[in-house]
Image (tube, rainbow, N blue to C red):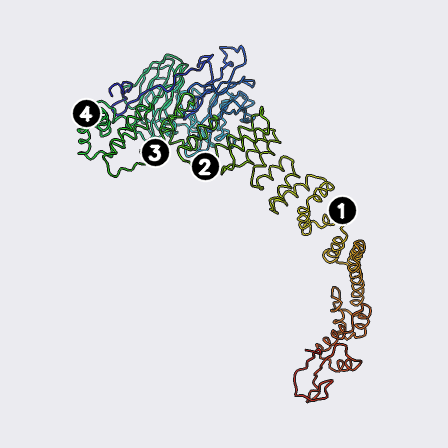
């Protein structure tokens, strides 16, 4: 146990710091780190190197090479840089490499060197060039801050949704600031810069001078500044050798340390653990690494090679040509267990388990001591927590065995924390492997979440490992295996050296009917890669027509999309395709396509009946459908025409169409309607009143009611109304008028063809025509024979 704490270094009385090796780097670097632009992503992310040929003191001899490595030094990508001079490199939160050029253009590359996109930081940056740049991270995404040659700052807080902000001008700034950084306050990104002994804070509206509280006197310049990983704390390195540490708002001082070195450091980063009260800053010079905090002494390490510091959530990664190390504060649980002469419950439980393995009676003594103090649950929990913070599997197993040993003597200790820790450590050990190269700590893993970790494995194309983790953790298929298989399929379609048939078959065999996998999304990726035929083959496996059709339309396969829409039985989908085809094809080709699809033609006719009547007429004309064309003109005569001449003309066209369709009945009926319309107009002109648009029977009835009996009889003769119908119309109309005298005359004019019984009031009695009997008074009524 004493040997285990040999690399622990105390900082004051309350904290220990240790530095251990993550990987032995086998990368074959052709340049020293000092001669390269370096960018390393947090959370155990990749490392990008670009030889800097644009340095004035070392002119370029050849084009530089952009190289991307995993954290363990495994090469991921290498490409010859053919664009302009690069000022700064940085990684986004999505592990995309941002390359800021001197002209203000930012090129974005993927983890494997694939070019994604580019954007510009504005015309002002283009004109004045870029002096310096910073890539920073906020809760909204990854941002870029630019210092131009005009000593003005331009900032975008989220490169995914680019909105450029030109920061206010600093009064009297004639040269580049000695140091500057980005800080986030109240969810807004600001610029903090040093000009001589003065500090300025730039926000979107103003430039404010700020003063760190409690700063040692005699400062004439700030040489370096660093913001903590969470943007809550700030460190300032002065030309007097003092390091001031306080809150990022510059309202509170935490501590101040005199390192007795006035040379400006190469790097300065924060090294703090979440929920820890200790605050420390790591400062690196050419061959020295110093950890300082709220203590009179510091921790110092000798650097044998050029090194680079990567701030992390709970520590600092330090890598060089040969090694990759992690420097952090020893967690409380580990400190209590492994500290020399510790009597903490976890330490006693670990000793008890070791003695138990030796079959020593001391195991019982240690165990009894813990139980007598009632601290066995605490001891188990300490061992579980300490196991999570250990990097080496052997020590993890030792602590977990101790926790398992202690659990045996507890009746109701919940096993969830133990099981979960075992699962988490198995996942962490798998991704920390040299060939994977993601050295996450337990705290980083919990902050990152398993879903983001799976996304990063997918970005590295480590699909088998990602699937094994999903199956081991028993994640829901939609969130786990299905999602990863979909990413694998999207990568598979980019392999252009494999035929379309082989790729489609391999994807279908692997995916099958896996829930949550959309073949249409995979087909869209294939289409984006220029493999249209492969996309069509993949769409054959898509069971949802609603997902097939939009992509087929996008691929200009409209006729196939129409067939798929018809097969689905979804009329809305068919209408969508029809409207797309109408805009895409000329009228003749569109109608020809419809003729080959009867269902689509029928639906389009229904659409045209309500929306496009002229198109409907063209359809009937092209199909020589004279019957429907006649019906169309009849509807048009009533719906569209108001003048009688126009209606008659439309009816005449309808009659001609019916004759062409050999429907003589419809043609004759249409001609009769034309005659009736002319007659009704004449009646309105001569008699007044409303006759137009009445039926033939209503016209006769209206004439009778108007006392125009002769005209009514003439109209009946002209239109060959049967006598029975005429008698009934006249009988009903006269009864409604209560014109009993005229009704009696009419009844006696000739024998009724329909038979009737008429009761009418005459003075004080009622007579019944045709019976000769008197009946009591009653209402006048008229019955047909048989009623």
- Check contact, mark 2 vs mark 4: CB within 8 A: no
Which residue is drawn at the image coordinates 43% and 18% (left, top)? 73
Foreground: disc 3 or disc 2 = 2
* Mark closest to the chain's N terminus, 1 or 3: 3
Q: Is residue 473 left or right of residue 114?
A: left
Q: Is residue 371 left or right of residue 513?
A: left
Q: Which residue is mark 4?
A: 360
* Mark closest to the chain's N terminus, 3 or 2: 3
Q: 106 or 227, which is in the foreground?
A: 106
Q: Is residue 724 left or right of residue 56?
A: right
Residue 252 visible (yes or no):
yes
- Of helix, strand and loop, which one carries label 1? helix
Q: Which residue is mark 2?
A: 477
- Of helix, strand and loop, which one carries label 2? loop
Q: Which residue is mark 1?
A: 622
* Mark closest to the chain's N terminus, 2 or 4: 4
How far apart are the alpha carbons under marks 2 and 1? 54 Å
Q: 682 or 714, which is in the foreground?
A: 714
Residue 634 on image: x %, y %: 75, 57
Residue 718 on image: x %, y %: 82, 68
Residue 364 on image: x %, y %: 18, 29
How far apart are the alpha carbons under marks 1 and 3? 73 Å
How far apart are the alpha carbons under marks 2 and 4? 48 Å
Which residue is drawn at the image coordinates 19% and 25% (left, top)? 360
How far apart are the alpha carbons under marks 1 and 4? 102 Å
Q: Would you place residue 121 above or below residue 602 in this image? A: above
Q: Residues within 10 Å of mark 3 (few under 14, many from 20)?
A: few
Q: Which residue is mark 3?
A: 420
């Amino acid at each position: 146990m004493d040997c285990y704490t040999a690399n622990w270094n105390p900082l004051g009385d309350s904290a220990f710091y240790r530095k251990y090796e993550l990987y032995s780097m086998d990368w074959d670097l052709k340049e020293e780190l000092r001669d390269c632009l370096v960018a390393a992503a947090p959370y155990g992310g990749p490392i990008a190197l670009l030889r800097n040929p644009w340095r004035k003191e070392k002119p370029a001899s050849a084009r530089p090479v952009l190289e991307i490595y995993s954290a363990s030094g495994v090469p991921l990508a290498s490409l010859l840089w053919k664009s302009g001079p690069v000022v700064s490199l940085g990684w986004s939160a999505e592990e995309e490499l941002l390359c800021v050029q001197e002209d203000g253009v930012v090129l974005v590359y993927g983890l494997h060197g694939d070019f994604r996109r580019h954007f510009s930081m504005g015309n002002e940056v283009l004109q004045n060039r870029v002096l310096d740049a910073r890539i920073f991270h906020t809760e909204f995404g990854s941002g870029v801050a630019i210092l131009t040659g005009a000593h003005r700052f331009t900032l975008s807080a989220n490169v995914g949704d680019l909105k450029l902000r030109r920061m206010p001008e600093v009064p009297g700034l004639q040269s580049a600031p000695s140091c500057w950084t980005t800080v986030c306050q109240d969810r807004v990104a600001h610029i903090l810069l040093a000009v001589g002994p003065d500090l300025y804070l730039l926000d979107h509206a103003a430039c404010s001078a700020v003063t760190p509280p409690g700063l040692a006197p005699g400062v004439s310049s700030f040489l370096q500044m660093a913001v903590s990983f969470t943007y809550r704390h700030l460190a300032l390195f002065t030309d007097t050798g003092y390091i001031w540490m306080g809150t990022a708002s510059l309202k509170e001082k935490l501590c101040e340390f005199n390192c007795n070195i006035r040379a400006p450091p190469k790097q300065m980063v924060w090294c703090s653990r979440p929920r820890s009260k200790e605050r420390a800053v790591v400062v690196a010079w050419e061959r020295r690494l110093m950890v300082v905090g709220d203590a009179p002494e510091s921790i110092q390490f000798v650097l044998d090679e050029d090194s680079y510091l990567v701030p992390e959530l709970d520590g600092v990664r330090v890598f060089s040509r040969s090694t990759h190390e992690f420097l952090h504060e020893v967690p409380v649980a580990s400190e209590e267990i492994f500290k020399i002469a510790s009597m903490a419950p976890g330490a006693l439980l670990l000793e008890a388990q070791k003695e138990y393995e030796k079959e020593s009676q001391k195991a019982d003594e240690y165990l009894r001591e813990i139980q007598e103090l009632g601290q066995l649950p605490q001891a188990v929990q300490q061992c579980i927590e300490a196991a999570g913070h250990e990097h080496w599997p052997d020590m993890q197993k030792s602590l977990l065995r101790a926790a398992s040993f202690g659990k045996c003597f507890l009746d109701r200790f919940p096993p969830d924390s133990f099981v979960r820790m075992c699962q988490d450590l198995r996942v962490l050990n798998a991704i920390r492997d040299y060939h994977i190269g993601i050295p996450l700590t337990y705290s980083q893993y919990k902050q990152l979440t398993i879903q983001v970790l799976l996304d990063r494995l997918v970005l590295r194309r480590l699909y088998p490992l990602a699937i094994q983790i999903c199956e081991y953790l028993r994640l829901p298929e939609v969130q786990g295996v299905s999602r990863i298989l979909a990413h694998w399929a999207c990568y598979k379609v980019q392999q252009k050296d494999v035929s379309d048939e082989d790729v489609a078959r391999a994807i279908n065999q692997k995916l099958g009917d896996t829930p949550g996998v959309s073949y249409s999304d995979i087909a869209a990726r294939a289409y984006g890669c220029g493999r249209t035929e492969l996309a069509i083959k993949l769409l054959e496996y898509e069971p949802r027509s609603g997902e097939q059709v939009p992509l087929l339309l996008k691929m200009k396969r409209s006729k196939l999309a129409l067939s798929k829409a018809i097969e689905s039985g979804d009329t809305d989908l068919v209408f969508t395709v029809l409207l797309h085809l109408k805009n895409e094809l000329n009228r003749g080709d569109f109608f020809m396509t419809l003729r080959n699809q009867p269902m689509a033609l029928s639906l389009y006719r229904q659409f045209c009946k309500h929306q496009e009547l002229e198109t409907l007429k063209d359809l009937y004309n092209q199909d020589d459908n004279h019957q429907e064309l006649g019906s169309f003109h009849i509807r048009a005569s009533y719906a569209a025409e108001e003048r009688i001449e126009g209606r008659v003309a439309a009816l005449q066209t309808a009659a001609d169409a019916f004759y062409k369709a050999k429907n003589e009945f419809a043609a004759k009926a249409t001609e009769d309607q034309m005659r009736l319309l002319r007659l009704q107009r004449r009646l309105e002109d001569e008699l007044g009143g409303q006759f137009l648009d009445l039926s033939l029977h209503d016209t006769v009835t209206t004439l009778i009611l108007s006392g125009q009996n002769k005209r009514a009889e003439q109209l009946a003769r002209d239109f060959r109304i049967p006598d029975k119908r005429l008698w009934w119309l006249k009988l009903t109309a006269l009864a409604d008028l209560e014109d009993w005298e005229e009704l009696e005359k009419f009844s006696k004019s000739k024998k009724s063809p329909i038979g009737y019984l008429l009761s009418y009031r005459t003075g004080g009695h009622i007579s019944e025509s045709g019976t000769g009997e008197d009946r009591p008074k009653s209402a006048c009524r008229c019955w047909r024979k048989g009623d």
